[in-house]
């Protein structure tokens, strides 16, 4: 026997062992994947049944699990959540949830088609329907299996029911939410910090006849805020009262909107008074205030005399661009107290108490 053949003969068992180990690993992983897929479907159904004790009726149909070999893809056909006791309900056309077998705390979601939402405003129920051309989301759970981070991206959303029979559309919607407060026995958030939220909307087309004075397109609307203070679970109205009584605040990191002639950039702090009315201390840059005051007059939201005084006062303190553009209020204080909204020294609107 030649040395070459002898060498090959000696290495053959090693090669066979490696190949055999790979085959066994593949078979074991495949068995694990299919067993886990069956358990995932059963757990979803069991979880939905368990939510009835919390007053939620959840329908998921028969979960369809795929995605072998690198991930699990769970498709839910016409899922729905009925939480009438909490004042809302939702039904979707379909949703796909994807996650990796080695990472059970991060999930990718894909959805499109029609979504129907019902909510109760304290007096009557409202029905909203929307159609999403393309929607994705990502969420991460913490060690207590509570949602810690969420990101949502929607493209071309058509919404009806918000303003009568008219249909509104949003070309792009992006949102994120992060919970950075701890929990005490799963009931209350850490007293110093709770979470943050950011929302961006681009090219919002309002229903015909809505916003005639300002125009039917909002070019963009962005806001970002952080919420501080304890928020108990359960009834929303009671949770807000506890948050207020414990000194809760909303830090408005930024708010930007461009709607027709109106442009606003502002930030500041917001809380609630004893009558559930906003208390705010903000600083803002405002362009197009004259057109806004005219719109308020047309909508009977401000008396003619107050509107005239507001224009005079704003024109005195506004910057006049050298290029002849509209005057701009820069770093003007915007405050809310005792049910009134003030821009500088001028009262521009009355603010009612929050109703839950």
Image (cartoon, rainbow, N blue to C red):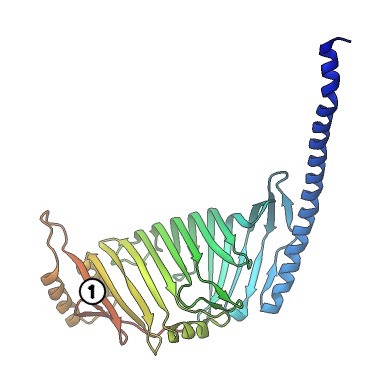
Image point (58%, 59%), residue name: 140
Pick the front one: 20 or 109? 20
Residue 237 in the image: above or below residue 38: below
- Image check: 344 left or right of 96? left
State which quadrant residue 211 falls in.
bottom left
State which quadrant residue 27 falls in.
top right
Residue 45 lies, in percent from the top left, at: 75, 65
- Crowding at dot 1, Cα within 10 Å, few <14 / some 14-19 / many 20+, comes out as some
**Can residue 234 be spotted in the picture?**
yes
Q: Residue furthest top?
A: 2
- Image check: 155 left or right of 321? right
Image point (82%, 23%), residue name: 11
Image point (68%, 55%), residue name: 75
Residue 6 in the image: above or below residue 41: above
Q: Which residue lies furthest to the right in this view?
A: 1
Say what secondary structure mark 1 lies in.
Answer: strand
Residue 224 lies, in percent from the top left, at: 39, 64
Image point (41%, 86%), residue name: 276
Residue 208 lies, in percent from the top left, at: 39, 63
- Image check: 1 left or right of 318? right
**Can residue 123 be spotted in the picture?**
no
Residue 37 lies, in percent from the top left, at: 76, 53
Pick the front one: 113 or 46? 46
Q: Name the residue under label 1.
A: 333
State which quadrant residue 94 falls in.
bottom right
Number of callouts in the render? Answer: 1
Q: Quadrant of the N terminus?
A: top right
- Image check: 319 left or right of 257? left
């Amino acid at each position: 026997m030649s040395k070459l053949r002898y060498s090959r003969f000696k290495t053959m068992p090693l090669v066979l062992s490696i190949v055999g180990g790979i085959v066994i690993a593949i078979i074991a992983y495949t068995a694990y994947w299919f067993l886990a897929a069956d358990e995932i479907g059963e757990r979803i159904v069991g979880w939905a049944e368990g939510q009835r004790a919390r007053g939620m009726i959840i329908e998921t149909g028969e979960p369809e699990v795929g995605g072998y070999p690198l991930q699990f893809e769970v498709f839910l056909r016409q899922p729905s959540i009925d939480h009438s006791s909490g004042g809302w309900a939702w039904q979707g056309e379909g949703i796909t949830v994807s996650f990796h077998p080695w990472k059970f705390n991060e999930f990718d979601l894909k959805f499109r088609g029609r979504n129907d939402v019902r909510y109760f405003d304290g007096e009557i129920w409202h029905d909203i329907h929307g159609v999403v051309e393309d929607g994705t989301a990502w969420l991460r759970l913490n060690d207590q299996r509570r949602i810690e981070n969420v990101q949502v991206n929607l493209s071309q959303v058509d919404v009806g029911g918000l303003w009568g029979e008219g249909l509104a559309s949003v070309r792009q919607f992006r949102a994120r939410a992060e919970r950075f407060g701890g929990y005490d026995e799963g009931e209350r958030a850490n007293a110093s910090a709770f979470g943050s939220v950011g929302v961006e909307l681009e090219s919002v087309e309002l229903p015909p006849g809505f916003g005639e004075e300002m125009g039917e397109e909002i070019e963009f609307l962005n806001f970002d805020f952080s919420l501080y203070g304890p928020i108990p679970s359960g009834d929303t109205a009671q949770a807000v009262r506890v948050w207020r009584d414990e000194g809760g605040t909303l830090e408005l990191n930024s708010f930007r909107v461009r709607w027709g002639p109106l442009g606003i950039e502002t930030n500041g702090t917001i809380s609630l008074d004893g009558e559930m009315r906003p208390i705010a201390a903000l600083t803002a840059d405002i362009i197009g205030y004259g057109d806004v005051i005219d719109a308020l007059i047309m909508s009977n939201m401000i008396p003619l005399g107050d509107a005239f005084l507001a224009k005079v006062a704003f024109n005195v303190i506004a910057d006049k661009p050298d290029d002849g553009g509209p005057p701009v209020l820069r770093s003007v204080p915007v405050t809310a107290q005792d049910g009134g909204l003030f821009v500088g020294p001028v009262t521009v609107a009355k603010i009612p108490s929050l109703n839950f």
